[in-house]
Image: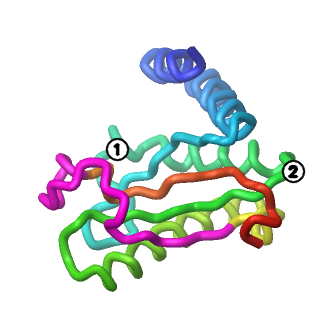
Amino acid sequence: MRNGLYLANKALGRDAAAEAAFGAVVAQGLDRGELAVKFLFRPGTTAFWADPAISGDYPMWLRQIARQTEPRPFCLALTGHASPTGPAALNRRLSAARAEAVRGRLVAERPALRPRTVAEGVGASQPLIGTGTDDATDALDRRVSFAPEACAARL
């Protein structure tokens, strides 16, 4: 339901209401221990997917993830992913760099998150699509995902 409010307000050009609704989506996900927000990247880079229809809201998403995470008593693990093309070692490094880039943006938004966030890369070991076409078809394979967890679990 909250996601629907976000999408409806966004479609209507109600930016403040869309951001508030997205903040509620993030808060609910964090409270449930499962934040299903994915940032998509251009192939072979740490740059977000160039299409503003896809990545245009990413700055607001990052702002809300940082704002909603900061007051909560847990840490946030960021996991970078890569598509299955290219050498495994390169994909691990690239996926880690993607997670670290997103972590850096969260910390820039809320510096108190620095000791409560951790970034790691898993390369192409967890594909959602797995075609290896490196186009929009498998964009979900080039992502960063989030998992709230007890701080003692990682940090």
Residue 132 placement (x, y as % from top left): 16, 61
Q: Identify the residue shown where x is 63% and y is 24%.
A: 21
Magenta region, main secondary structure: loop
Residue 95 placement (x, y as % from top left): 41, 71
54 part of magenta stretch: no
Quadrant in which the C terminus appears: bottom right
Callout 2 crowding tier (Cα within 10 Å): few <14, some 14–19, many ≥20: few
| Above or below for 17 versus 104 | above
Residue contact at pointers 2 and 1, CB within 8 angstroms: no
Dot 2 falls on a residue whose secondary structure is loop
Q: Identify the residue shown where x is 51% and y is 67%.
A: 99
129 part of magenta stretch: yes
| Above or below for 116 versus 63 | below
Front-lying residue, 113 or 36: 36
Quadrant in which the N terminus appears: top right
The amino acid sitting under disc 1 is Pro
Magenta stretch, residue numbers: 118-138
Q: Identify the residue shown where x is 59% and y is 19%.
A: 2
Residue 34 placement (x, y as % from top left): 61, 41
Image side of residue 53 versus residue 37, left or right: left
